[in-house]
Each structure stands twice: as structure tokens, then as C-alpha cells.
Image (tube, helix red, strand yellow):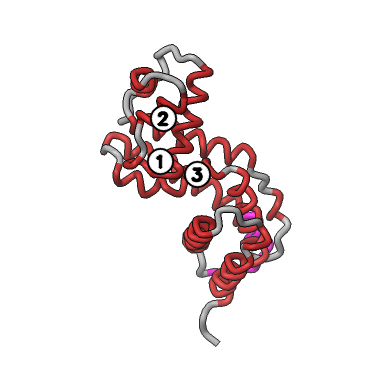
Amino acid sequence: MVEDMTAIPKDPEKVDRILKSAMHNFAIHGYRATKTDVIAQEADVSKGIIFRYYGSKAELFVTALQQATNKLQSVADYSVWRGAHDLVDMIVRATKYKIELELEYPDEFGILINGYVSAEKAPSNAQQAIKKIYANATNNSIEQLVSPVLDQLSLREDVERQTIFVMMNAVMEQIQKETKVFMKNHPHAKLNEFTEIIDNAKKYVSVLENGILK
């Protein structure tokens, strides 16, 4: 279990600088390659302050990851896709909107993308906390995305909603992988340059909705 460091008095300005630098570095380099020396230098604090405030790099990572999740959840406007008339329309709206957010909040998305892999590389005492953050964020986003659309559709009686949530999550993970590769190769891309990814999202969900048989 990650140690609770909340009882230690912290300078809010130093906390802001540390977390801003930490999130940026974890977003770019992932957990293992990020150096606390670099974070300390960028945040204009001593390395000792970082460990006094957070105990370890793993705990700092967990804190930065949670902050990124909280930020994205606070700014997300779920009404963007609630008017979708089917799952294909929803995934197109959601993909476009997510790309817009990713362009606006690159560090928050970056640490989330790298964080899942980092969970396997972090010390065992931090892995559970990291995976819990992901589980909560994924469950909340999938249900909020898909449920309003499913309420409008006539579903087969033998299909459980949880099955649909799992399959939609798999599609969204694939779209995120493609988005990550595209943004790495096109760091200054605008929304209108993501046409192929949006088209792929439509194809994936269309197969999910309609199946593969004639």
C-alpha cells in the first residue's frame, strides 16, 4: 500500500511546481526513465523536498496520475455525445472530442497513456494504487459514454450491457493506441488531420453493432 503523506505540511506553490514537472516528465518518459533529479531542477526545489512530500518516486507518480485523472474528469463534457443516435455516431463524437482534449491537455493524457505500462514497472506497493485509478476512470467513462446511447437502442435479449461495455472499452483502447502513434509522428497535427483514426473508429464500432456475418 502506498504510504499516506498527507500529514506532512506542504508549500502549495512547491507542490504545484513539482506536480507540473512530474506530470510532464512522466508523460514523455514513462515511470522508469523519469528522473527525480530533473523534476527537482525544473520545479526549483531540492530532491529532498520531493521525497519529504511524497516519500518515493512511485508515490509521486501515483499522485500525478490521480491529478491528471481528476483534471480530465472535471473538464470532460459528456453532453457532447449523449445525443448520439447509435454507437457509431457516439464513437465518432467521442473520438473527435477526446482528440480535442488530448491536444489541449497533452501531459494529462500522456501520463495516463504511459501510466498503464508503468504500473507493471513501478514497485509492487504502488501497482495496486495505479491500477485502482485506471479501473475507476475506465468504468466511469465507459458507462457515462455508452449507457445513454444503449437506452435508445433495441438490444438483443441475450446480450448483457457489461459485455458491450467491455467491447467498447477494447475499441477505445485501440483508438487510443492509434492516436498515440499518430501524435508521436505528427506532434503539431490539428483535429482535421485525424480523419483516418476517426474513420477507423467508425469501422470498428460498425462491426461491433452489426456483426461480421451476412
Residue 156 visible in image: no
The CA distance from mark 3 to mark 1 is 9 Å
Point 42% across, 40% down: residue: 26
**SS at circle 3:** helix
The CA distance from mark 2 to mark 3 is 26 Å
- Residue 75, by quadrant, is top right
What residue sits right under mark 3 in the picture? 137
Point 36% across, 49% down: residue: 117
Identify the amino acid type marked 2.
Ile
- On the image, the x and y values in percent for residue 210 come to 58, 76
Tell me which numbered mark, 2 or 1, is placed earlier along the sequence.
2
Residue 132 is tagged as 1
The CA distance from mark 2 to mark 1 is 25 Å
Identify the amino acid type marked 1.
Lys
**SS at circle 2:** helix
From which residue to which does the magenta span run?
147-157
Determine the main secondary structure of the stretch shown in magenta: loop
Image quarter where the C terminus lies is bottom right
Q: Residues within 10 Å of mark 1 (few under 14, many from 20)?
A: few
Q: Is residue 38 above or below residue 133?
A: above
